[in-house]
Image (spheres, rainbow, N blue to C red):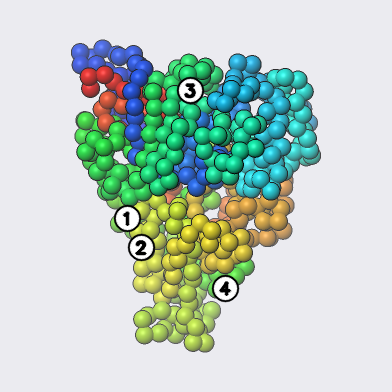
Amino acid sequence: MVTRRHFILATGATALLATTGLAIGAEGAVEAPVSGGSLTWGVETEPSTLNPHLNGQAKAKLILRNAYESLLARTPEGGYVPWLAKSYSISEDGLEYTFVLRDNVTFSDGEKFNAAAVAFNLTRVKDPTYSTGNSSGHLSHVREVVAQDEHTVVIRLARVYSPFLDGASAIEILSPKSFSSAQLKSGGPEIAGTGPFILDRYIKGQEVRFVRNPHYDWAPENADHQGTAYLDEVIYRFLPESAVRSGALSSGQVQVIEGIPGNDAGLFRDDPEFSYQTAINTGTPYTLYLNINRGLTADLTIRKAFQASVDVDQVLQSVYRGERLRAWGILTPADTDFYDKSIEGAYGFDPKLANRLLDEAGWSERDGEGFRIKDGKRLTIEVVQSQATVRDQRDILLQAVQAQARQHAGIDIALQYVDAGTYSTRQKDGQYGIIPNSTTTQENGVTIYFHYLPRDKGGSINYSRTEAPEVSAWLDEAASTLDTNKRFEIYAKLQRYAILEQALGLPLYVPDDQIAASGEVKGVGFRPFKRLPENAYDIWLQQNA
């Protein structure tokens, strides 16, 4: 069993000290952080909404965590430290969670943070007409939320649900006044949080600007400092093209970027004028999920043949130049108690097997372009990808997979890039053969739960659309116990079932995040446990750099 590990790499002493909030001066002395200045950060992903309850993009958390905060913060090992809540307790039967809140917190609109505000938020997020996805799914197990007094919230569950703390404690708390704003759906300056920065302006397609919250004094205890943020302001510019981001940093148009392709890593990692850091994400690998309820991918033989037709190692090397780690299972190996290492190497590229399976299934003929046909119909599998979530050269990666499937097995992979609305509809209705996706979640048992539970039972991102009763039984059993070892046994069994036995997906690579920064930027780093780039709270600018 894999224990929790620390997967953060930094290049050089300067980068390492940058993650601790210190810097080395010209004479070798350690410099203390200073306040003031403006930071411009080039980011890969523009948020689909600035309301943190409604935004399901993990990459958007870098931006939104500047203004919106949750009850607890995570440690690198996966534990918890106080944040908006100063303590919590769980009843012996696992059905009641009590949070004691800080008494010195205010929302940026001047409203007081208290138990009533927390209870109101959780009740609204629980309502599927307001919020859908993982957050509302966690709260679907809640029987009631009670503001016991001004600073005590009690949450009572209808049944034991082991991932509850990991999910519910991470829900951002908004000022109750925000829920009556016309900006509630889109997010905006009227949606007030408690964070170290206040959302000031948003220019769609260009940038979002935050200014320092002058009243902030409630950072989690594992932050590098307490009190207000160092920076006066931070501006996130939306630069979806990787080459543009790299060029913007190199030319000084921005001071920090994230999402650095393999081809560009050496530009910053090997240059002493910049710091470069990378961290492996928790959650699910970037996986091609095969729809088992529609079209050709409903055939297990075709799913297994597709798995065997792609040389994943070769594809990753050609696209990422060795800068990405191959994935094998339904989880990443980063900081999790539930990753089953035994699946590594248990399956893989085998063109002979792929072709034999397809021949035996009656797909033995080929058309003039080399694709397999049966009864005059081409063996075509449609991949549906939201254009808004294409990042990390995944469009190029999918083209490489497409070429591999054609070359090695005669399978036609049709790539369809669609707008967010079309993607949502097709995902909901199952109108696809494959959906590619990765998730970075608060807790990996939660990840499994929402990916493999039937959709009508809360499996909001069950892309393979499996409804196997044994899967539901395993997930119910895992969610009903607080025994980590028992949960590992169940999830390991599910992992082998999903990938080896039923070929519900083809994992490609383990997502990671990269940060490159110019020399004057200090304190930039990753969010504990999730390994996503952290907000700008601990960042400061070295003077006379």
Q: Residue under circle 2?
A: 400
Amino acid type, label 2: Ala
- SS type, badge 2: helix
Q: Residues within 10 Å of mark 2 (few under 14, many from 20)?
A: many
Q: In which quarter of the image is residue 16?
A: top left
Amino acid type, label 1: Val
Q: Earlier in the sequence, mark 1 or mark 3?
A: 3
Q: Which of marks 2 and 1 is nearer the N terminus?
A: 1
Question: Which residue lies at the image location 54% right of the left edge and 19% below the top edge?
Answer: 218
Q: Residue under circle 3?
A: 213
Q: Which of marks 2 and 4 is nearer the N terminus?
A: 4
Q: Which of marks 4 and 3 is nearer the N terminus?
A: 3
Q: Residue under circle 4?
A: 295
Point out which mark residue 335 bears. none
Amino acid type, label 3: Asn
Q: Would residue 202 be seen by someone viewing this image from the given angle?
A: yes
